[in-house]
Image: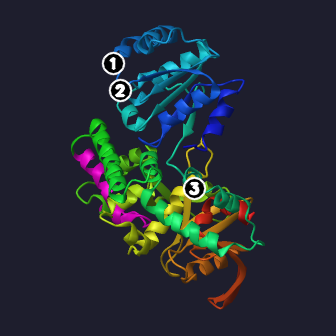
Amino acid sequence: MERRYQADLDRWHVKKNRKPLVIRGSRQVGKSTLVRQFADAAGLMLFEVNLERQPQLAGAVKTLDPRKILREIEFICGKGAIRAGEALLFIDEIQGMPQMLQCLRYFYEELPELAVIAAGSLLEFALADHSFPMPVGRIEYFSMGPVTWEEFLKAKGELQLLELLETFQLCDDFPLSAHERLLDLMRDYLLVGGMPEAVQLHLDGEDWEQIFQTQEGILQTYRDDFSKYATGRSLVTLQRVVDYLGQGVGRKVKFVNIDASVQAREVKAVLDLILKAGVVLKAEHSHGNGIPLNAEINAKVFKLFCLDVGLYQRITRVKHLSDEEIRSVKFINGGALAEQFMAQQIHSLETPGRLPALHYWLREGGRGNAEIDFLLQVGTQVVPLEIKAGKSGTLKSLFQFMKEKKGTLACRFDLNPPSLQEASHVVEGEEVSFKLVSLPLYCVLQAERILR
């Protein structure tokens, strides 16, 4: 299937001062497939090595000599000489031989014309046990995630619906038939998720149990990976972070709820690693007084989300559903499911070269609790996003936020067709009014454009 990252690789390849590229992302999000498709489209001969399967490269890597490394790879691949301008060197599973990261500096300095891409998963775990100078300023990073909701639509051939989403303005009428169709497709995505293997099974018409088994296998692969880089108490805590997501998605994190048997600092250390590895996503509290949102975060106040909504469904043990049941069931965790979907899509909006960030707002204490699910920067404004799993719900927290921040624009996501209205309510003796944009959940990736 076509991924949106293809254009980013095209831009990287034609840069004048191109550096070796390291693609970061969790296992099985499609990193290797993306690179192979890119090489094919660009007409480059692909020289691919997997460092978890090629231990014979270790000696050459220790020399830090790029020409010796290339010589070994030429014989491993058996395709002849690796020529700059004609070839792409792809170093997969670089975490299997972390010192190769240090070697990338010398590829940049001594062989700058050669296109080099490396990819790895759980790289931070591997680097935690190694100490060598990182090639700062000599490589660039690229973050990759699961298939997005709109990539899913494109893969299913729903191009007319995709065009409607990409061009819709609030002044337009939204066809009710399109709205109902998009809700049905979104329900599929909430179960399939964005892991490419699960998406492909869905496209091939496999039944739900086959898809669920594949997702379970991906989760087991993650757990097996953890055991390579953590042992004893740390490994148990890692497993508990993943299990915690089953009931903890979208809730303020308290370390004791993840693992009460160890000290908070140990849970935090493990959590920091798994966050860097991209297996778990984090939304941090920001005061939301203006931009940049990251300037006002409280790093101690945050909530967690799963990498992928389909994997989240597996953690909560959704299984044994017929197609008819899929169409009619109302999950009791619908609110968390909607918030998980939104977190994953908003997370994907960040440019691939930067580590994505999620923000939300939380007020606790004397004036009463209030929470805004997410904060989104739109131009120079901070727009609060309220997420609803159904077609109705109160907006108490939204009015509290708009009163406190003197905001003029807010957005609610639910299952209704798009609309624009003037919202007004008396809060603590003061009338609060603002423009409220109501969008269906499936418009999330177009939200910034529509709000602008």
Instruction: State which tag comes first along the sequence, 3 or 2.
Output: 2
Please name which of the two marks, 3 or 1, marks the residue nearer to the observer.
3
Picture quadrant where residue 95 is located: top left
302 relative position to 360: left or right: left
Please name which of the two marks, 3 or 2, marks the residue nearer to the observer.
3
Q: Is residue 386 above or below residue 68?
A: below
Using a 10 Å C-alpha cutoff, classify the residue at mark 3 as few (fewer than 14 neighbours), some (14 to 19) or many (20 or more). some
How far separated are the C-alphas under marks 1 and 2? 7 Å
Residue 431 in picture, x, y percent from top left: 70, 88
Marks 3/2 in contact by CB < 8 Å: the verdict is no
The disc placed on residue 52 is 2
Q: Is residue 305 above or below residue 195?
A: below
217 relative position to 38: left or right: left
Taking depth in this image into account, of 417 and 157 the one nearest to the observer is 157
Q: Residue at x 60, y 59 (%)?
A: 296
Q: Is residue 314 visible?
A: yes
Taking depth in this image into account, of 171 and 249 the one nearest to the observer is 171
Q: Is residue 137 above or below residue 261?
A: above
Q: Is residue 118 magenta?
A: no
Using a 10 Å C-alpha cutoff, classify the residue at mark 2 as few (fewer than 14 neighbours), some (14 to 19) or many (20 or more). few
Identify the secondary structure beneath mark 1: helix
From which residue to which does the magenta span run? 233-256
Residue 163 in picture, x, y percent from top left: 69, 58
Mark 1 sits on what residue?
Answer: 55
Taking depth in this image into account, of 205 and 347 the one nearest to the observer is 205
Identify the secondary structure beneath mark 3: helix
Using a 10 Å C-alpha cutoff, classify the residue at mark 1 as few (fewer than 14 neighbours), some (14 to 19) or many (20 or more). few
Q: Is residue 247 magenta?
A: yes
Residue 230 in picture, x, y percent from top left: 28, 40
For badge 3, the amino acid type reads: Leu
